[in-house]
Image (cartoon, rainbow, N blue to C red):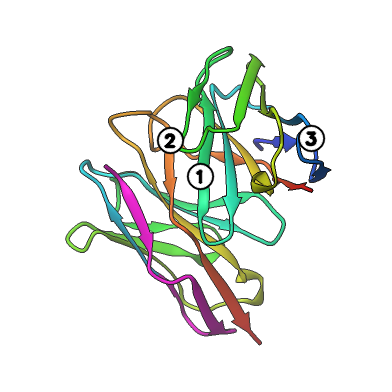
């Protein structure tokens, strides 16, 4: 069975400092992994996705994530936080072997950015 | 751009009422999904559909039903609303089967049941 764990429910950084949002996954198969972002009162938007190509994935707005099979991790990073990055971030793993096309969501990490 | 629209941003209903939440996508996607989102619980799948008139239960289908009469439209129905169904409801769609296809989300409907 697939699962995903976001290790922090809240992360607070200062503007201009690096961002690290941590995600571990569990999967019997080679997974597809995603990061989505949700700004207040908005729907979810895809930041980036890993689908067994390059292990370092670049996304929108300067975010990137690295797939590490040995650590079963897919952490999201950004070198320099901006105020507009304040949002909730979801790490997501695809479901294999059952209902194709379904996703399993982590519980989310709320990112605060201080001026 | 893919667009997924939901009929209401905010809804307030009374306990026992029948509630319809509508979702429309404009990209000819086969797959459509309904989730509910609650603080600290992330998104949980209620129902999904891979084709017209086809539906499958997700993780938390109790108290809900769905309808997909046309490919672009997927409706979530609360037969008799209860206070524990107060939540944010998100609709999504995706192209084809396969876990590496991203889902596109609507803006959400915040439902309050009094």
On screen, residue B111 versus residue A93, left or right, reads: right
On screen, residue B5 versus residue B97, left or right, reads: right
- In this picture, which residue range is highlighted in magenta? A1-21
Residue bearing mark 1? B44
Q: Residue at x 43, y 35 (%)?
A: A102
Look at the image and say whether residue A4 sits in the magenta stretch. Answer: yes
| Chain letter of the residue beneath label 3 in the structure image | B
The 10 Å Cα crowd at callout 2, few under 14, some 14 to 19, many 20 or more, is: many
Q: Is residue A14 above or below residue B3?
A: below
Which quarter of the image is occupied by the C terminus of chain A? Answer: bottom right
Look at the image and say whether residue B113 sits in the magenta stretch. Answer: no
Check if mark 1 and mark 3 are on a common chain.
Answer: yes
Residue bearing mark 2? A102
CA–CA distance in space, label 2 to label 3: 23 Å
* Tag 2–tag 3 contact (CB < 8 Å): no
On screen, residue A35 versus residue B99, left or right, reads: right
């Amino acid at each position: 069975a697939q699962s995903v764990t976001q290790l922090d429910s809240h992360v607070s950084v200062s503007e201009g400092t690096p961002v690290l949002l941590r995600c571990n996954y569990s999967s019997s198969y080679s997974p597809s992994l995603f990061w989505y972002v949700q700004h207040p009162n908005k729907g979810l938007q895809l930041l980036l996705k890993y689908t067994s190509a390059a292990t370092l994935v670049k996304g929108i707005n300067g975010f990137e994530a690295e797939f590490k099979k040995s650590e079963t991790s897919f952490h999201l990073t950004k070198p320099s936080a901006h105020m507009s990055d304040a949002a909730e971030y979801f790490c997501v793993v695809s479901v294999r072997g059952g209902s194709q096309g379904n996703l399993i969501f982590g519980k989310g990490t709320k990112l605060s950015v201080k001026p | 751009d893919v667009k997924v629209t939901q009929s209401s941003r905010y809804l307030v209903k009374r306990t026992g009422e029948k509630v319809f939440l509508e979702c429309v996508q404009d990209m000819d996607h086969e797959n459509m999904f309904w989730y509910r989102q609650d603080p600290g619980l992330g998104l949980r799948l209620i129902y999904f559909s891979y084709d017209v008139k086809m539906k499958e239960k997700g993780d938390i289908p109790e108290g809900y039903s769905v309808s997909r009469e046309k490919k672009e439209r997927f409706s979530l129905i609360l037969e008799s609303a209860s206070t524990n169904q107060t939540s944010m409801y998100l609709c999504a769609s995706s192209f084809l089967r396969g876990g590496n296809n991203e889902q596109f989300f609507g803006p959400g409907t915040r439902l309050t049941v009094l």
